[in-house]
Image (cartoon, rainbow, N blue to C red):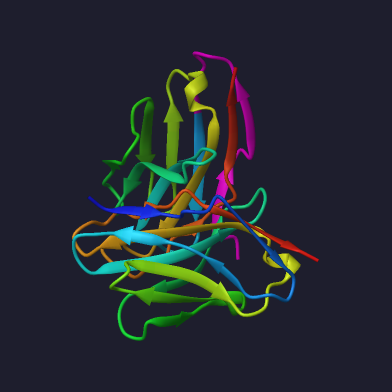
Amino acid sequence: NAGVTQTPKFQVLKTGQSMTLQCAQDMNHNSMYWYRQDPGMGLRLIYYSASEGTTDKGEVPNGYNVSRLNKREFSLRLESAAPSQTSVYFCASSEAMTGFDQPQHFGDGTRLSIL
Amino acid sequence: AQSVAQPEDQVNVAEGNPLTVKCTYSVSGNPYLFWYVQYPNRGLQFLLKYITGDNLVKGSYGFEAEFNKSQTSFHLKKPSALVSDSALYFCAVRDGSNYQLIWGAGTKLIIKP
């Protein structure tokens, strides 16, 4: 069972460069999420997609864009990377966002450093 | 506004002893509460949840959590700690009007042999 797969696992960028983080899930989940994790701050939601064809801003969307390519895939793009975006990025999915008791399933993260 | 607090950055427990990782929350409606565990260089894994009903919830790996409505707490517990329980633990909450999970800052649990 692959679950949620994120690529790449590690990336180093220079300030101003752009890149796309990829995420795919094979659990037929409707909802997908992008989080960033910084030491001592827990998880902060960047963007989410409640269902295929919809995306919405989370707590910290500035500097990011997303695309829900299809039901399986949800990508996160940094158009012009800044050192403040150095973080570990996690993609997650759940059956449906409207299901309040449904847990989220996480990928293993992308460790991104911006120099 | 919804919020979650994990008052301890780190908890140290000897192997074989009981462990408790604390979580308190604030929501406007009925809470939906979750515990997740994160091992080094891995994503978060779901441990257990409280939705309604019995205040003592059992989850994966022998963990359980006690919901206390009057104290707005949802503490994670295990009767006998294992070295392999060493990890980062996150509490999360939502209420019935908000689809987004609100996450605590995490508690590092260290189990010493």
Tally of marks:
0
Q: Position of residue B91 (x, y in %)?
A: 45, 60
Q: Can residue B69 be seen in this view?
A: yes
Q: Give the range drawn in magenta.
A: A1-19
| Residue ranking furthest to the right | B113
Q: B41 or A51, which is in the foreground?
A: B41
**Res B92 quadrant in image:** bottom left
Q: Is residue B55 magenta?
A: no
Q: Is the residue A20 above or below the residue A25 in the image?
A: above
| Residue ranking furthest to the bottom | B54
**Res A1 quadrant in image:** bottom right
Q: Is the residue B106 above or below the residue B18 in the image?
A: above
Q: Quadrant of the C terminus of chain A?
A: top right
A11 sits to left or right of A17: right
Q: Is residue A18 magenta?
A: yes
**Res B4 quadrant in image:** bottom left
Q: Is the residue B96 above or below the residue B107 in the image?
A: below
Q: Where is residue A69 in the image (x, y as percent from the top left)?
A: 38, 43
Q: Is residue A71 visible?
A: no
Say which residue appears at 47% left-offset and 65% top-offset: B35
Q: Where is residue B82 in the image (x, y as percent from the top left)?
A: 72, 71
Q: Where is residue A67 in the image (x, y as percent from the top left)?
A: 37, 38
Q: A114 or B29, which is in the foreground?
A: B29
